[in-house]
Image (spheres, grey):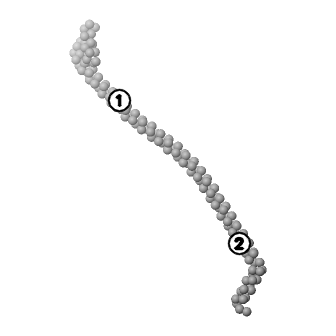
Amino acid sequence: MSVLSEVESQAEGVVSGGIWKVLAIALLIALVASGGSLGFEWWLAARDRDKAETGLRTEQGISAQLRAGIDLQNTRLLQLGQEKLDAEKRGAAAQAVAAASGRRLDSALAKIAATHATTCTEAMPTVNQLLKDIK
């Protein structure tokens, strides 16, 4: 007998012996187990992704609220800064008016500094002149 015929007879024995059925069942079990494992891992990854997306959306909402608060705070600070500048301008104008009034008063007082009155009648012309000079 030749080598080829011996291999053929052994192959016929394996095929007819049912070993291929056992190997096919084992292969099927291995495929089902690995497929189920991969499906379970895929399900776990999808669940974790969904949790992460939910957490991300929550954090994005919080971040948006914080940004809105910061924007409002910055707007208010700009308003306060503008109000401060306006108040400083009003204060400078008031100081200028007060300085002009002070100069008028100093000038009027200088005019009447040498005047001496002992009675009301003597003092009234000086008081009237002082009031006229201050206006």
Q: Tell me which residue sits at (37%, 34%) in the image.
A: 85
Task: Check the image and report above or below for 105 versus 84.
Answer: above
Position of residue 99 measured from the top left corner of the image (x, y, whole percent) = 29, 26
Direction from residue 73 to residue 29 in the image, left or right: right
Q: Mark 1 belongs to which amino acid? A: Arg
Task: Check the image and report above or below for 114 versus 68.
Answer: above
Name the residue carrying label 2. Answer: 27
Position of residue 54 measured from the top left corner of the image (x, y, whole percent) = 59, 50
Residues packed near mark 2 inside 10 Å, few (<14), some (14 to 19) or many (20 plus): few
The mark found on residue 68 in the picture is: none
Furthest residue toward right: 17
The mark found on residue 90 in the picture is: 1
Direction from residue 135 to residue 44 in the image, left or right: right
Position of residue 110 measured from the top left corner of the image (x, y, whole percent) = 23, 19
Q: Which quarter of the image is occupied by the N terminus?
A: bottom right
Quarter of the figure with residue 81: top left
What SS does tag 2 mark?
Answer: helix
Quarter of the figure with residue 108: top left
Position of residue 14 measured from the top left corner of the image (x, y, whole percent) = 75, 81
Furthest residue toward bottom: 1
Q: Which quarter of the image is occupied by the C terminus?
A: top left
Q: Tell me which residue sits at (75%, 75%) in the image.
A: 21
Camera-side mark, 1 or 2:
2
Quarter of the figure with residue 117: top left
Residues packed near mark 1 inside 10 Å, few (<14), some (14 to 19) or many (20 plus): few
Q: Mark 2 belongs to which amino acid? A: Leu
Between 87 and 15, the one nearer to me in the picture: 15
Task: Check the image and report above or below for 76 versus 36.
Answer: above
- Residue 123 visible within the image: no
Q: Tell me which residue sits at (76%, 83%) in the image.
A: 13
